[in-house]
Amino acid sequence: LLLQLRIQRINEDELKIGEMLINNLNSKGFHIINPYDLFKKEEKEKVKKIIELIQKFDPIGICVPNIIESLILQAKHHKLETNIIKILEKADLLEKTQEKLKEELKIKSKEFNKALEIIRQKLNPNPTLEFKDPNDTNFYVDPDILIINHNNKFKIKIKEVSIFKKELKKIAENPQKQKKAKWLIEALRYRDEILAKIGIAIYTLQKEFLRRGFKSLRPMNLGILSEKISVSKSTISRAIKNKYLKCEWGTILIKELFSSVGGAKTNEFSKLSIKITVKKLLETNKKMSDEAISAILKSKGISISRRTVNKYRNELKSEKGRTYYGT
């Protein structure tokens, strides 16, 4: 997608908008968050123009909010008959009754069934599937916290947990279930509030890390964050379990941001940033001794023992193939 974007005749500002829009797509090619929330109000027309441009890229059906919008985009691209587009635009009625939809659209049963068959045969609910490498075992991570840098201004977004209207309607019919539903909604609101606080705290404490990557990661533990946002360490620990943060240079498991300084006698460096420095030294000379590495680190203001260097060396061996973004 980025390659297709970069060969377009667009200016630098439009290119940056396009890159942000593409980075905001999930594995199916749908928006992770409302794309207009990433930009200033005065940029709305530019954003709309670039969204329409990306929607013409291969695969057709991407840069849209959901499956239905994707199917509509595909149907228009393939110039399918009007009835198919009308059915897709009223897809919410399919859940209730096909008869009501046929009546509203004034379509006969034969034409209606034919249109549904064409939708099944010609349209793809997962437009990016054919572009995936069958041998690729990597899985896509849908981030829970997004920290986006636009024109040197950071925006923090929290992934919303969707509850289907159909399910809520069923729950509303049962007073006992309605009480549980209200509790669930409140719990989700609390979860969003905690994640938002964590996101703001990470931004406040790790601005350079967000801009430059792991090499600028500063020491941060649950205690520091607990004090910052006035929430217990156990609550934070539960909130970040299996949660991911996405920024402009990559996606990371949030718990990886919380580590001890790994033997450093200074609060200027985190364990991960020290390991990256060790990794770079070993890349220049694999046979460099632990003592020599310790001495070089000391000259950089990082005081760790030879034993700790050896520990990091062994950890790096076990992590062979891992990429530390922003290094």
Image (cartoon, helix red, strand yellow):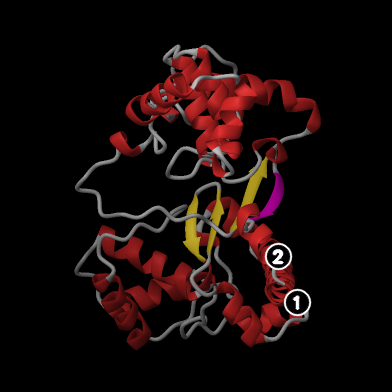
Foreground residue, 202 or 307?
202
**How would you rate the neighbour count of disc 1 (Cα within 10 Å): few for under 14, some for 14-19, many for 20 or more?**
some
Specify the segment rendered in magenta.
Answer: 153-158
Label 1 sits on a secondary structure element that is helix
Does any portion of residue 221 appear in the rendered image?
A: no
Please rate how many residues cluster around mark 2, counting C-alpha atoms within 10 Å: few if below 14, some from 14 to 19, many from 20. Answer: few
* Any part of residue 31 in sight: yes
Q: Residue at x 46, y 82 (%)?
A: 262
Check disc 2 and report its element: helix, strand or loop.
loop
Q: Indicate which disc residue 228 carries.
A: 1
Question: Pointer 2: what residue?
Answer: 173
Quadrant for the C terminus, please.
Answer: bottom left
From the viewer's side, name the closer residue of 9 and 47: 47
In the depicted structure, whether residue 24 falls above or below residue 311: above
Residue 218 spot, x, y in % from top left: 58, 69
Q: Is residue 124 left or right of residue 221?
A: left
Query: Which residue sits at x=63%, y=79%?
Result: 236
Name the disc covering residue 31, or none: none
